[in-house]
Image (cartoon, grey):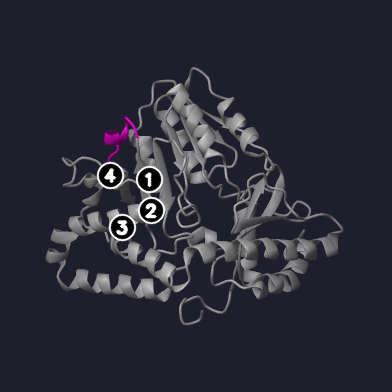
Amino acid sequence: MDADWPLSPTPLHLNHGSFGAVPRFALDLQAALRDEMEAAPVRWFAGLPDRIATARLDVARFLHADPDSLALVPNASGGASVAFAGLPFPHGGEIIVTDHGYGAVTMGAERLARRHHGSVRTVHVPLDAGPSEAAEAVTGAITARTALIVADHLTSPTARFLPVDLIGRAAREHGIPFLVDGAHVPALLDDPLAGVECDVWVGNLHKFGCAPRSTGVLIARGPHTQALWPLIDSWGAPLPYPRRFDVQGTLDVTAHLAAPATLTGIDTRWGWAGIRARASALAGTGAAVIAEAFTAITGEDHTVRVGMPAGPMRLVRLPGTLGTGPGAPDALRARVLDELDAECAFGRFGGVGYLRLSAHVYNTAADYEEFAARCVPVLAGWA
């Protein structure tokens, strides 16, 4: 893998999920595209909308999505911002979110509610809830004021799936717009939108898909599609969705253009089906090894029971109150990076701190064994 990935031997890379990692061939392709842009800027930007449209069609094919439903956006949060700006929202309306939601997207929902003198209701979904219980927690909160439902396809802080198919079905029955945050899902699932009814679905290609950053997708279906507009007003404004998103002025969109070749190139080199299976098995084994290392020190069970586990993303319970205070997960991430030379993700849920593991093709069992031997005793000491 040293020849295929530019990752340094140190730090220890156990957090693919946050920002991804880009293979060398994709970075080389993006660099060549930037060289082309700088060599003849007028020619580049004049022909860019057609090239973006081609990339959009290729990405739609990879995701098994209708090409007329998909627009390219900077990232999933940007796609959610488009939805918050375009979906209808009445004065005094209510938005339903879950306590597993990604902070930036939840903040966007709160801003939308404030603009219209509405409110946000956060519903609790137990970490170990199965599909029916999780769906009931969300749909049972629907009232006459509910104007929008926002749910994660795969939750960032708790590494679990939510039953967006069941939630979407109920939202459609009630006539309520439904936004799905699928930031981690492209390439992690082969057909991510299968069975999912929603008005807007957003995801990142630069997470599990390993495309150059930042590459996101916005998939819109239903009666509100033509109400969605790019966050930047540009010359594509007269065009229908999604073509209006192909014209974004002088943005550097080389990452978008390189994304299709990245997705297919990874499939050619390693095979997406094999990557998913191996990463899921590796994350599961790694979580068990690290949990056992904690248990050997604390005498407590550090395994985490998740109702709809997310394959390549797994949780390990941290000891004591480690990582549970305000701002503690980010502070712990910085301290582990600085003092233990390990890239990790930490979260908290229900008053408990967690280590979130996220595996990909470049990880090995030795990564988790090293963390268990070298880092777990220190973390236990900090606790």
3 or 4: tag closer to the N-terminus: 3
Q: In the image, is 61 to the left or to the right of 130?
A: left
Percent position of residue 8, x then y: 52, 78
Please tell me which residue is depicted at 38% across the width and 50% down the height of the picture.
64
Percent position of residue 295, x then y: 82, 60
Q: Quadrant of residue 335?
A: bottom right
Which image quarter is the C terminus in? Answer: bottom right
Residue to which mark 4 is pinned = 68
Q: Is residue 95 above or below residue 251?
A: above
4 or 1: tag closer to the N-terminus: 4
Nearer to us: label 2 or label 4: 4
Residue to which mark 1 is pinned = 79
Give the CA distance from mark 3 to mark 2: 14 Å
Crowdedness of circle 2 by 10 Å Cα count: few (<14), some, many (20+)?
A: many
Say the numbered circle drawn on residue 58: 3
Q: Amino acid at mark 2?
A: Gly
Crowdedness of circle 1 by 10 Å Cα count: few (<14), some, many (20+)?
A: many
Q: Is residue 210 something one can see in this rendering?
A: yes
Tell me the magenta residue range: 222-229
Q: Is residue 119 above or below residue 207?
A: above
